Image (cartoon, helix red, strand yellow):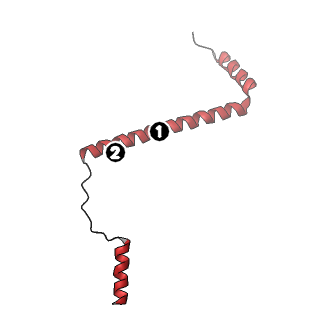
Amino acid sequence: MSPSIWQIIIVGVLLVLLFGRGKISEMMGDVAKGIKAFKKGMSEDEIAAAEAEEEKKDPPKAIEHQNTATAETRDSKVAQKKAG
């Protein structure tokens, strides 16, 4: 047996009287925020899983050793050029 339109209207009126329009509106806003946070979390998980799968297929290549001078070496070379 499904509820009639009058039963639904009576329940709606009772809810508005008990909680007030502002409280119901506030609760709906909180529910919407929760749904958005859930969707965002799910999409972040899917992105992370896709990145992990891509990394398994194509692991990062080894970085070749680069000849980089330290700050002290660079400073001493500059000083030698000025003095020389």
**In the image shown, does 30 or 56 lie closer to the viewer?**
56
- Residue 68 got which mark? none
**In the image shown, does 40 or 29 lie closer to the viewer?**
40
Say if 74 sits above or below 65 in the image.
below
Residue that numbered label 2 is attached to: 51
**In the image shown, does 49 or 77 lie closer to the viewer?**
77
Q: Quadrant of the N terminus?
A: top right
Say if 78 sits above or below 18 in the image.
below
What residue appears at the point 37 percent right and 73 percent down from the top-left corner?
72
Of the residues shown, which amino acid type is indicated by label 1? Gly
Q: Earlier in the sequence, mark 2 or mark 1?
A: 1
Residue that numbered label 1 is attached to: 41
Residue 18, percent across and down?
A: 74, 23
Quarter of the image for residue 43 reads top left
What is the residue that sits farthest to the bottom in this orientation? 84
Q: Quadrant of the C terminus?
A: bottom left
